[in-house]
């Protein structure tokens, strides 16, 4: 009879790891642990969601205030030698979030949800017990008056908290 798999694998990720990937445009991450002795080699490339000249601005009744660009490295790629895989990782000096999809199996990578320098784990959400965590989802688009194309009240400018999920109004010029 097969033995049950561990629910999560602890991953050591430090600010030094962030510094090592920050300047790279593409690289391989060898032996990424998924748990129970299973590890994979990741082929990753950096991508950006902001253009080089993009500005991050918070608007308020007092006027616009420009913010520093987020210190984050976004990576996408695949598991080396395995067809039909996808990998997405978001790294910062304080956290790691991501997903590794293999055929028929998905692993999530998550740091402490508060962004503290807490532990990072890799887990298969299918192995969590009933009532345990579920894959990350926001769901603000399912709230009344929050769907695409629906009107918002004049006082509703985003930035509200809904069960630890932030909603923001974004304007692109």
Image: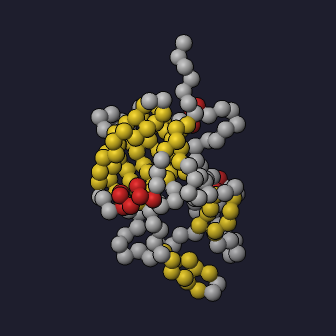
**The residue positioned farthest toward the bottom in the image shown:** 62
Vertical comparison of 152 with 89: above or below: below
Name the side, left or right, on which 9 lies relative to 26: right
For residue 54, say whether it is visible.
yes
Vertical comparison of 132 with 60: above or below: above
Res 37 → quadrant: top left
For residue 108, say whether it is visible.
no
Name the side, left or right, on which 79 lies relative to 97: left
Res 159 → quadrant: bottom right
Colouring convention used in this rendered image of the protein: secondary structure
Front residue of 8/82: it is 8
Vertical comparison of 45 with 127: above or below: below
Front residue of 73/8: it is 8
Name the side, left or right, on which 155 lies relative to 86: right
Across and down, in percent, residue 145 comes to 68, 61
Quadrant the C terminus occupies: bottom left
Quadrant the N terminus occupies: top right
Res 90 → quadrant: bottom left
Across and down, in percent, residue 75 comes to 38, 53
Q: Residue at x 53, y 48 (%)?
A: 120
Across and down, in percent, residue 31 comes to 36, 39
Name the side, left or right, on which 146 lies relative to 103: right
Across and down, in percent, residue 50 comes to 40, 67
Q: Residue at x 47, y 68 (%)?
A: 70
């Amino acid at each position: 009879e097969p033995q049950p798999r561990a629910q999560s694998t602890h991953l050591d990720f430090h600010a030094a790891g962030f510094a090592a990937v920050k300047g790279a445009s593409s690289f391989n991450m060898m032996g990424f642990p998924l748990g129970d002795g299973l590890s994979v080699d990741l082929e990753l490339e950096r991508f950006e969601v902001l253009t080089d000249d993009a500005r991050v601005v918070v608007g308020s009744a007092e006027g616009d205030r420009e913010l520093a660009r987020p210190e984050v490295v976004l990576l996408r790629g695949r598991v080396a030698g395995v067809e039909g895989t996808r990998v997405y990782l978001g790294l910062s000096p304080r956290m790691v979030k991501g997903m590794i999809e293999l055929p028929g199996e998905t692993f999530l990578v998550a740091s402490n949800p508060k962004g503290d320098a807490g532990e990072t784990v890799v887990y298969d959400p299918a192995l969590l017990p009933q009532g345990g965590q579920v894959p990350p989802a926001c769901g603000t688009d399912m709230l009344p008056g929050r769907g695409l194309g629906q009107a918002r009240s004049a006082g509703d400018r985003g930035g509200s908290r809904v069960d630890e999920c932030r909603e923001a109004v974004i304007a692109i010029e």
